[in-house]
Amino acid sequence: MSVRRFERAPVRNTFGVDARAGLLIETDHADDLPGLFAGELAGTSPQASELLILGGGSNLLIVEAPAVALHLDSQRIEVLDAQNGIVRADAGVEWHRFVMWTLEHGFAGLENLALIPGTVGASPIQNIGAYGVEVGERIHAVDVFERISGAFQRFDAQACGFAYRDSMFKHAPDRWLVTAVEFKLAPSLETAALKLDYAGIRDELASMGIATPDARDVAEAVTGLRRRKLPDPAVVGNAGSFFKNPIVPVAQADALKAEHATLPIFPGNNAATRKLSAAWLIDACGWKGHRGGGSGDAGVSDKHALVLVNHGRATGAELLTLARDISASVHARFGVAIEPEPRIVGARW
């Protein structure tokens, strides 16, 4: 039996918030899930903070610890179709390790997503993205366990409802548990089309002395950029970018740009919208480098205004209060609503 149980176990989270589940259940095999949900997990509800499906803990803000946490730690990676670039990874595989594995085995397409924390299983839920690429663009299919029916199901990429930092799985945490993800990648590093026109990648490659990069060079450039711009969770607790970049109507974006010439604006999700830089909006409100809360340890990174940090003793409630205050100040000044990327456990936004 591959199932392990631990009472009063710490709930891993890169924010470093002290949270302990009444019971932590770990398994290396998805085949254990039907028995668990037909037995001791029957009737538990994520929406009531009874059950938390736990990955790497990199996209969580825990305000109230769950009664039970479940961690699927399956670790297989396999090439299903080398000629067509179909690669499958289990949910428990650490994301950056998987990205580097694909490059080492001659597959391109995930290089812009290097060094994102978390696991493969979490990647489609959030539709993780960075440097001009969203993982949904590279997903071939997602294997899931459905709690309602107690059966395994499979969805192709189109059925997953991918949108900016969103998917069908994110809206039903009490229904779907991702068990594995299949990716459609370029089967050759030499001929793969690269995405280089985003947020300094070309400049970083030039500083590396690389004029004709391949996917491995792009991954190295992205890794360097992320390490300089974002605080290391091993040093100071954080969940990476805390707020989504807001998407607004074109007219609102144009009006803000006319008043604030340095505001970065990007294409939206259709011709009628534009995406604004949440980091710029937050920085303009004076939050970058802020530190406060009852513990004095809830703050905003001095490296990047999008990143909330725990300097050591901050509680999830303190970090949530800070996030709400930041959002309210941006709305008051610019009339723009910004929303969190991480899942908030034990409270509502």
Image: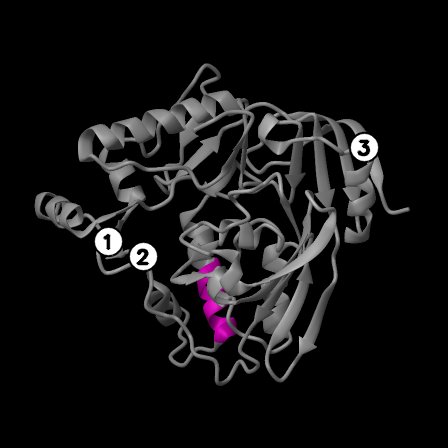
State the image coordinates of residue 144 (x, y, percent, origin top left). 66, 54
> Where residue 40 is drawn, which disc sits there?
3
Q: Which residue lies furthest to the front in this view?
A: 149
Instruction: Residue 70: say if magenta.
Output: no
Residue type beneath disc 2 = Asn
Q: Sequence order check: which comes first, mark 3 or mark 1?
A: 3
Q: Quadrant of residue 210?
A: bottom left
Instruction: Report the magenta stretch's main SS.
Output: helix
What's the CA distance linking mark 2 and mark 3? 42 Å
Assess whether mark 1 and mark 2 are in contact (beta carbons under 8 angstroms): yes
Q: Which residue lies furthest to the left in this view?
A: 258
Name the secondary structure under disc 3: loop
Q: Which residue is drawn at 55% across and 48% down?
A: 169
Residue type beneath disc 1 = Thr
39 to the left or right of 322: right
Q: Which of 175 and 75 is in front in this view?
A: 175
* Residue carrying label 1: 273
* Residue carrying label 2: 269
